Image (tube, rainbow, N blue to C red):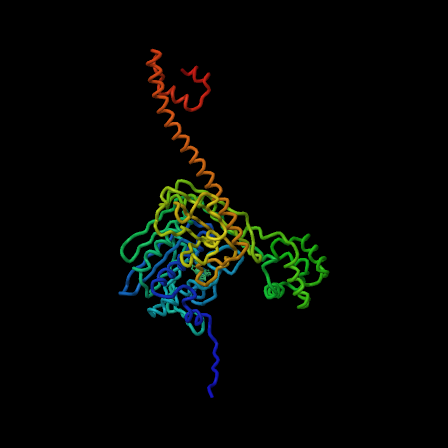
Amino acid sequence: MSSTKFKQLSPAEFFYNNRSMAGFDNPTRAVYTVMRELIENSLDACDAHGIKPLIYVSLKRVAADELEVLIADNGVGVPSRYIADAFGRVFFGSKYTIRQSRGTFGLGGKMAILYGQLTTGEPVNVATSIGSDIHLVKLSIDIKLNQPIVHQKKILHNPNSYRGTTVSIKFKGDYVSARNRVIRYLRMTRIALPYASIIFFDPENQVFLAPALTESMPKPPVESKPHPYGVDIIKVKEMVDSSKREVTLLKFLQKFSRIGVTTASRFVTWLGLDPNRPVKKLSDDEIKKIVEGFKSFTFLPPDGSSLSPLGEQTIRTGLTSEYNPEFISVTTRPPSAYEGFSFIVEAALAYGGGINSENGSNEVRLLRFANKIPLIYDSSNDVAMKVIEEDIDWANYGLDPKVDPLLIFIHIAASKVPFKTAGKEYVADREEVRREIRLALRKCARDLKTYLSKKKREQNFHMRNEKLLGYLTLINKYSSALSGKAPLEGRQLGLLIKGAKWDDAKEEI
Ligand SMILES: Nc1ncnc2c1ncn2[C@@H]1O[C@H](COP(=O)(O)OP(=O)(O)OP(=O)(O)O)[C@@H](O)[C@H]1O
Ligand SMILES: [Mg+2]
């Protein structure tokens, strides 16, 4: 008889065994994912804290199929007591808060480090400072125990108060086949972040140089309280446990976003509970009643303060620098929410100029971003593509996105982006999000339609005038010969064409 064997898997072991879930399927995709995870961490350490990002990335070939990536940023740095865990323990991070950030899981950077460790056996090198001493740490991850193994540590004085982080990882990867994606990712990052400066040296000695195009930066997001629509029993129990003994139900409810003292009293009365009861004394049934009540009571929606949308000017600057289109229409939707998480959709349609019309591929040109991260893979599964293909009747606007020189830009800024995978490649088809994208795109399409009809009217008007001028020139010539008077001058003919009143024209003449 065979016996069943049980064993426990650590989080590090789990992701090590299931690398493809996080975007490390093969050496090509690994190059892109390693770079993306590290760049995202660097950008989070800058713009989420109001720092204009200055990011330096170098990718070197150190053996036939082995690369070394080095990334340096001017971000907030990592406090010394957290360095080992931040880079050596899966599910450890500073972004488990209700606030927009690129990072969410406490996993991405570690996956890059684990992947490097798995394919080359080499540890990661980190140098970081929050403005005081510089800490140099060489570490790897103990996969079984999910904890850091620190190989070397050094502290350097920092007389110039340098602040930021440098990470360097060796890993197996195929840059030649990843190059197009990597460059596309950097160009898209540039479109969303024209306020960042990015320098990338690739293994073929090519340099991608993207200095900042603008001084202005979106306002950093602020951390917000959980919204009553977005919590479950476990979360509420956790909040009850961490409350002090004397906290009453009325006070406790004010720990949620959009609940002040008035709403709290109305809610408690509606539930039929005692507002002065210490929250720690609530029974499981009463907690369940509160959580169920949260779902049916009407609260104001989340206010969007935890979000940092790009803003119209940033989007215009980014799109203009990359495509120089003839026309751009941008729409920012007001804050909305799903399951208590706030989000804002920003959309843009760019038309003409550098956006070429006959690309021959018969594909929609769609640039997708979520929390300022460019999304490159799996666009056909993304909610934005579903809206474009199923919800919008482009013919109504006289447009065909597969043929016209049209570029569609969508950014979802959310306190939690409904990504479908740990690789953060595409956004789930949630009705609330889908509706906002639909409304934003329709508004952009209306603006573009207005622009194009005006342009057409002006073109027709111009053509009509050209023709008229031809006829009038002839009439002018013959009538002057017949009457023996001097012919009118070109300027006077122009005035007639413009439709100026005859009396005005006479005065001019
Ligand atoms: N360049 C950096 N500057 C400052 N802090 C950093 C940097 N890189 C990583 N960190 C810290 O290390 C933590 C872990 O990073 P990691 O990429 O593993 O997870 P995350 O960014 O929190 O979430 P995600 O899994 O979505 O990437 C971060 O939350 C952050 O606090
Ligand atoms: Mg990260």
- Horizontal and vertical percent for residue 171? 33, 65
Residue at 37 percent across and 69 percent down: it is 151
Q: Is residue 231 left or right of residue 94?
A: right
Say if 421 sits above or below 437 in the image.
below
Is residue 214 positioned above or below 495 on the image? below
Q: Ligand 1: which quarter?
A: bottom left
Give the residue furthest to the bottom.
Answer: 1
Residue 308 visible in image? no
Q: Which residue is painted at 68% across and 58% down in the image?
A: 250
Q: Nearer the viewer, residue 384 or 53?
A: 384
Residue 308 image offset from top left, x and y in percent: 50, 50
Quadrant of the frame with the C terminus = top left
In the displayed structure, would residue 481 be above or below residue 196? above
Q: Is residue 189 left or right of residue 302?
A: left
Q: Nearer the viewer, residue 5 or 118?
A: 5
Q: Is residue 98 above or below residue 401?
A: below
Work out whether residue 41 or residue 324 is closer to the camera in this orientation and state it. 324
